[in-house]
Structure formats: C-alpha cells, structure tokens
C-alpha cells in the first residue's frame, strides 16, 4: 500500500483526533494537548480550517454526539499528567463554528466515552482517570478509577456518577468494542460491560501484562479478532493476542514511547497502524500477527491515528505530535 501526504498543517503538540460527520457536513477535528488551539477541517471544502477554540487545550479525548455536529472534549489535562483541573466541555455547532459550554470538572480524566442508552439523548458515560490524586507529576500512589454514570445531552450534565471498585494504575488506554469497552493500565487489560436489565456495570480483568493502549482487528483473517497492545506505560514493545488473549507474538525491536494505535480494514486487508514518539518517531503499517511492518514515515512522533473513507477513497489522519503537524495521507494500492 502507498501512503501519499496530501495535506499538512501546523498545530503545536497536536494530540486528539476525530471524524465528525452528520447533517450533510463532514469534518475532521484535531486538538492540542498544550494550551493551544483545536481546529476543524472541512472535508467538503478543500480542508478549510475553522477555529473551534484558540487556547485552553490540554485535550486528550474528543467524542462526537451521534446524529449531530456537536461533540464533547476534555480540556486542561496539563501540566503533564498532574491534571487536577481537567474538565469536559460540549461544543455545539452553530452553522459556521462551535459554541462552548462546560459540562463540569473531572480531575485526571484521560479517556472518556458516551454510549447510547436511549433514543432521547441519554448516554452511558465512561470516564477513565489516569490517577485519583497526585502530589507531583510522577506520583502514581493513588491509582485511577473508572467512573460511570449517565450523560444527559439536553441538560448538558453527567448524572448518577460513581466509581467502580477496581482501581487501575496509569489508566491510559481505552477502546470501544461492539457492546463493551477495553480499558488498559499497569494491572493489564480489562473488559467493561455496560449495564443491562439483569446486571450492573461489570469490569473484568483479562490479562495482567502492563498495557498502555490497545486496538483490535481480524488480522489473521480467521473470523476472530486479534489484539495489538502497546506493552508497558507508553511502552517500547508490542504484543499481539488472539481472541482469547493468548499471546501470538511479541516485538523484538524497541519502539520507545509507543502511542498511536489503530486497527481495521485498509484496501480490503485487515491491518494495524502503530506509531511511537521517541527514537526515530516512526509510523508503520502492520500487516500480520507476526508484526511484519511497512514504514509510513519517520520523525513524525504520532500521538493518534485513524483511517477514514471519503468518496470511496481511504485516507489516514495522523496527529504527528513531535513534528507539530496535522497530516492527511491518501492511501492507494501500490
């Protein structure tokens, strides 16, 4: 596969990314993890840049509100991981840009999500805090919590908030699956099942290997999911698990500060994407469960990546954090 860069823009410490598509409009949104802007780029108008906000920043997560051009975002996740005053804001599309309102302050929330609960603007809320409190940036003595509740979009409120019993140290990774979510940290990989009429929220430990982030796809083409996990906190190695979380392979070459991860179908092939933010700061395409990789670029240091489709053409969006670059690559067959 060939990755050709077709768009580039400067954004200092770009981090969080999102595709935002509804109401016959189509955008990508990219936000900085520093006190820097969030931009939306119009995919129907030659990547026209729209300022969503011009400062505050500190954004780790962007979450679209289904069926709308509105979205939720974290802000003030700084300095570093010592983010006592992290907050969640709602951005409401006004036809030309976005108007901001504050949902509330949620200390140390690194990843969060909303899962449709009803058809009238009620969503399950999941908030993963990287720690519960800190005396200094590298203090991990008070492990993070998985917070759950109900997000009421009409009231712009998170209600019935509670923490689940299991605490997770360095609770960094989150991945929404079909009907459940995966959450990762120093204690390993956990499965979070949403409430049903019969059961409340359920958090189950799947493996004990320290894991920073995780992605899933059927890379073996055997009809079952495989998982790519970044081993360690911002770890330097990768591990591939089978559908039962048994190890298939472990990488031998160090990839320091592993961070960007994605799994899915590219040109009818199930693949993973992986990028790291130290050393040669590479971004690569992983083609099989034995971690055979094709370089996409070096000296990029991507924080997050995703693949999207537009007019039957696939594109890779990468927040190349260490290069301070928002980049879009067109994906073609060789």
Image (cartoon, grey):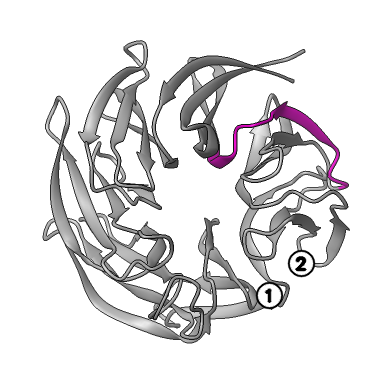
Quadrant in the rendering for residue 14:
top left
- Left or right of residue 141: residue 279: right
- Label 2: which secondary element: loop
The answer to whether marks 2 and 1 mark residues whose Cβ atoms lie closer than 8 Å is yes
Toward which corner of the image does residue 175 lie, by quadrant? bottom right
- Pointer 2 residue: 245
Residue bearing mark 1: 206
Q: Where on the picture, by quarter, is residue 74?
A: bottom left
What x and y, as percent, mark residue 80?
Answer: 42, 60
Nearer-the-camera pick, 209 or 196:
209
Quarter of the image with the C terminus is top right
Above or below 182: residue 198? below
Whether the magenta-drawn stretch holds residue 297 is answered as: yes
Query: Is residue 132 in the magenta section?
Result: no
> Element at badge 1?
strand
Q: Position of residue 149 (x, y in %)?
A: 30, 73
| Residue at image point 33% right, 51% down | 58
Location of residue 330 in the rendering, given as x and y in whole percent from the top left corner: 58, 17
For residue 91, above or below residue 266? below
Quarter of the image with the N terminus in it: top right
Q: Is residue 64 left or right of residue 120?
A: right
Residue 146, percent across and down? 43, 75
Mark 2 neighbour class, 10 Å CA radius: few under 14, some 14 to 19, many 20 or more: some
Q: Residues within 10 Å of mark 1 (few under 14, many from 20)?
A: some
Residue 56 - label = none
Q: Is residue 104 above or below residue 64?
A: below
First in sequence: mark 2 vs mark 1 = 1
Q: Nearer the viewer, residue 69 or 80?
A: 80
Tell me what residue is drawn at x 57 percent, y 20 percent: 329
**Hey, which residue is sitting farthest front in the picture?**
136
Q: Which residues are magenta?
A: 290-306
């Amino acid at each position: 596969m060939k990755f050709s860069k077709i768009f580039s823009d400067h954004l200092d410490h770009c981090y969080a990314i999102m595709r935002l598509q509804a109401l016959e409009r189509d955008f990508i949104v990219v936000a900085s993890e520093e006190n820097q802007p969030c931009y939306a780029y119009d995919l129907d108008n030659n990547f026209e840049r729209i300022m969503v906000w011009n400062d505050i920043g500190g954004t780790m997560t962007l979450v679209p509100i289904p069926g709308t051009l509105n979205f939720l975002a974290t802000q003030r996740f700084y300095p570093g991981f010592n983010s006592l005053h992290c907050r969640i804001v709602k951005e409401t599309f006004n036809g030309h840009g976005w108007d901001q309102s504050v949902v509330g302050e949620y200390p140390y929330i690194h990843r969060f999500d909303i899962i449709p609960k009803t058809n009238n603007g009620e969503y399950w809320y999941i908030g993963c805090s990287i720690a519960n409190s800190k005396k200094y940036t590298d203090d991990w003595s008070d492990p993070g919590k998985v917070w759950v509740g109900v997000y009421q979009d009409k009231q712009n409120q998170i209600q019935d908030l509670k923490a689940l019993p299991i605490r997770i140290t360095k609770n960094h990774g989150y991945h929404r699956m079909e009907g459940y979510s995966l959450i990762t940290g120093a204690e390993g990989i956990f499965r979070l099942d949403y409430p049903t009429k019969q059961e409340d929220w359920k958090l189950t430990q799947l493996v004990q290997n320290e894991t920073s982030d995780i992605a899933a796809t059927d890379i073996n083409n055997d009809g079952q999911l495989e998982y790519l996990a970044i081993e360690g906190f911002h770890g330097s190695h990768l591990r591939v698990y089978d559908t039962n979380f048994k190890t298939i392979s472990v990488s031998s070459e160090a990839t320091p500060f592993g961070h960007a991860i994605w799994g899915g179908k590219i040109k009818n092939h199930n693949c993973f994407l992986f990028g790291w933010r130290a050393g040669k700061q590479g971004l690569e395409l992983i083609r099989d469960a034995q971690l055979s990789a094709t370089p996409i670029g070096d000296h990029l240091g991507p924080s997050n990546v995703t693949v999207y489709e537009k007019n039957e053409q696939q594109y890779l969006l990468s927040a190349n954090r260490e290069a301070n670059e928002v980049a879009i690559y067109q994906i073609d067959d060789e």
